[in-house]
Image (cartoon, rainbow, N blue to C red):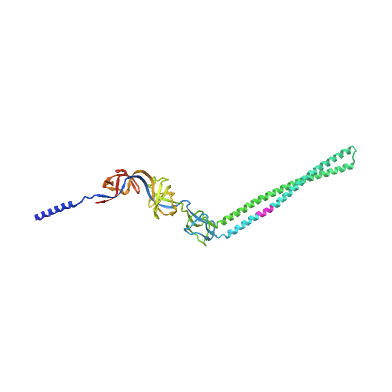
Amino acid sequence: MKKILALVLIAIFIGGFFFIKSRKKVTLVPVQTVKVKKGDVRNVIDATGIVKPQVGGEIKVGARISGTVVKENVRVGDYVNKGDLIAIIDNRELKEELKKAKAHLEEVKKTYSEKIKIQEMRLKSALASLTAAEAKLKAEKENYELKKWEYDRQKKLFKIGYTTEQKLKQAKAEFERAQSSLKAAEESLKKANLDVKIEKRNLEELKAKYKSDLETAKAALKQAEIRYSYSYIYAPKSGIISFVSTQEGETVVAGLNAPEFVTILDPEKLENWIYVDETEIGKIKKGMDVEFTVDAYRGKIFKGKVKEIYPKPKILNNVVYYIVVARGFKDVKLLKPEMTTHNSIIASIKKNVLVVPNAAVKWKNGKYTVYKVVNGKVVETPVKVGWSDDKFTEIVEGLKEGDTVALKVTRK
């Protein structure tokens, strides 16, 4: 029994010896390598967001009057330019009102034109009478002076006996007639002046009334034109029809709120609402660069800047978020409202620091390590790291520019 046990032990010893001799040493062989270089590392805050229309980027177009929709020219998805006709509301009554307002305005112009012409002729006649009265008064004054002189002369001659009583009486009668005629001419002039004033006042009042009635008629016409224009609904701005609520044949009733016809979305007035966690919001400032993607265009990066930071929080699933608004990105027409965005807000950048790709840094035995390649051999080298982003990690200690590190190794 002892001999058998000894033989077994000898066999195990010999087998173990040959097994150990047959084993080869395992080494790490670099498969993919890169050079350590200087580069930039970004401090990035990642967050999810939603594409939203800007203020004024989405407009609801309504109706100002009630009536039946007789024509509607747009459908959802149509692109309209500013001023394009969207719909027409039955406007037969409004058209008739407009016709009456135009006719009334023409009637006012025609009627007052005739009245003013007649009144101007009356004033002209009164002015002619005034001129005649002034000439008559002048003549009567001259005649009065002449008759007065003759009467005075006859009185003097009668006193000294050089004229007859009959000639004196005749001179007196002629003087009295001249005096009476002068008074009559003076009264005629007063009346002529009064007539001119009356006719002038009548003309001024007529013109003032014409001006007032003309303005009233024009205002009524303008109002009729405006109400008539309400029956034609035009696009107030260019954009895409994103919603249609009314169809041909339907009746709309205008009340306190204008009935909505369509919604126009300006495809270039979109913004990105980024929901940033309350723990990160303190790092974000206006003007920071933002890069984001959407699921519809995974390979495309949209770039913009932080324009607004809303002070009021948004609570989602008991988590406090703040809305950071980004604008200024190109190719905005590719985006649509409510698209989900995957954002990187670049809070700061370290420039010209030593960097390696993220894949080159390993966490082993409680410390950061890289596979440094020296003379074709892999040497596990501990390093001290700084910032890291989605591509690179900053190397603070352990490597120098130009060193070679392995991204991937294999065991041999």
Side of 300 relative to 12 (left or right): right
Quadrant in which residue 158 is drawn: top right
Q: What secondary structure do most residues of the magenta stretch adopt?
A: helix
The picture places residue 91, in percent across and down from the top left corner, at 56, 59
Side of 2 relative to 211 (left or right): left
The picture places residue 384, in percent across and down from the top left corner, at 30, 44
Name the foreground residue: 178 vs 318. Answer: 178
Name the foreground residue: 85 vs 62. Answer: 85
The outermost residue toward the bottom is 249
The picture places residue 252, in percent across and down from the top left corner, at 52, 59
Q: Is residue 113 magenta?
A: yes
Name the foreground residue: 73 vs 279. Answer: 73
User: Which quadrant of the rendered structure holds the N terminus?
Assistant: bottom left
Q: Is residue 225 magenta?
A: no
Which residue is drawn at the image coordinates 88% and 42% (left, top)?
167
Q: Which residues are magenta?
A: 109-115
Q: Is residue 126 visible?
A: yes
Q: Is residue 308 visible?
A: no
Which residue is drawn at the image coordinates 64% and 51% (left, top)?
212
